[in-house]
Image (tube, rainbow, N blue to C red):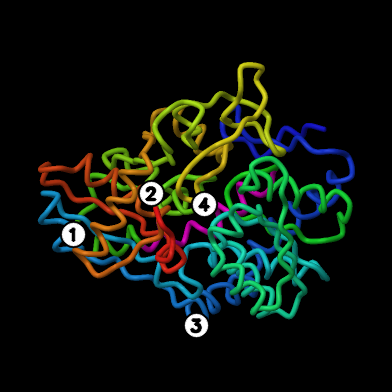
Amino acid sequence: MLKYNGRYGEYGGAYVPDVLAKPLERLANEFDRLTKDPSFQKEFVHLLKHYVGRPSPLYRAKRLSEQVGSTIYLKREDLNHTGAHKINNTIGQVLVAKHMGATEIIAETGAGQHGVATATAAALMGIPCKVFMGAKDAERQALNVRRMKLLGAEVVTTTMGTATLKDAVDAALMYYIEHPESFYLLGSQVGPHPYPRMVGYFQSVIGNEAREQILMQEGRLPNAIFACVGGGSNAIGLFSGFLDDVEVEIYGAEGGGEAIPGNTAATLTFGKPTVFQGTLSYCLVDDNGNPCESHSVAAGLDYPGISPQHAYLKDTSRAKYFAVTDTEAIKAFEMLSQLEGIIPAIESSHAVALAAKMLKNKNQLAIVNLSGRGDKDVEREF
């Protein structure tokens, strides 16, 4: 069934079976009501400040800036409780779930950061939690699997398809169809309406803070901003604070894999508009137009779909998206660690790599969203 709402230009909507139409309509109505409720806003802001640790710092990376030849600030989402931007959204959605009387939270995860953040927020509110994860991702992100279980979540692995994020979403959606009374806490800005709007709303705190911070520290807006893009939540979080500032260039770094079409997760670079997992947006497809496998060294970017809002920003040229290869991201992972003493998530390293390339000897002012920390990636052999 298609509902013509939740649109970004032609993209978005809700392409869902009838069994989910009513739960999604109820969720959309409740979300709209709560965002106008001062008591809900007060509780959300209180938890972001006193539990998550916001505002996150905007840090001038002096040695990185000197090497690149431009002034680069890092928006330190890696310093949030649980180590990534994901907690902004999970705190918000679990508050919505609590107000709706939910008795079970379900979620999907790739790199495990959303799973950990969901398990954390569910534990905080005392609501049982079930997290779906691809078996391949569970193996390469074993630390986060252990963290989720310690927090009381049930981790359900799937071997469907490539056993990565796409398949975790499929497994979670299938469970949701069978248990529509559950609260599905979607982690990225994808899926049917109202999820893209809801996730974008809760992540907008990143861009709102960054805009205020850069004006305070530099007295002007940046020339450019950068973020990695998988499904698109951390990127839209940063971008949202600057969308109306036409003088600010906006760049998204996709998971380019090995830089070969068919061995990549660069959806906006190589994909086509397609209905996928409940929404119309760009998607990596095969010769028959069916969604196909993606590949990235970063589990959080290893997804063939993309946010409908990012699709709209691409088509309108408000944002530009580039594929960053696995090799480039790994080099940036090592570079930031050694220059600044900050170990970034391999996902965030894609944004660092793109910024270093685009800003080389340009004497520009820029912000890079450091969406998560790299503890989960340190034991991996790239």
Q: Which residue is mark 4?
A: 300
Image position, residue 221 (x, y; %) = 24, 52
Query: Mark 4 or mark 1: which comes first in sequence?
Result: 1
**Location of residue 65 (image quadrant):** bottom left
Q: Please tell me whether residue 176 is drawn above or below residue 102 in the rendered image.
A: above
- Marks 4 and 1: which is nearer the front? 4
Identity of the residue drawn at 28% across and 52% down: 332
Q: Nearer the viewer, residue 305 or 210?
A: 305
Taking the magenta stretch, the answer to whether it contains residue 200 is: yes
Q: Which residue is mark 1?
A: 219
Q: Which mark is residue 227?
A: 2
Q: Are marks 1 and 2 in contact (CB under 8 Å)?
A: no
Taking the magenta stretch, the answer to whether it contains residue 171 is: no
Identity of the residue drawn at 15% across and 46% down: 364
- Marks 4 and 2: which is nearer the front? 4
Report the magenta residues as a range: 193-209
**Location of residue 93 (image quadrant):** bottom right
Q: Amino acid at mark 4?
A: Gly
Q: CA distance from mark 4 to mark 1?
A: 34 Å
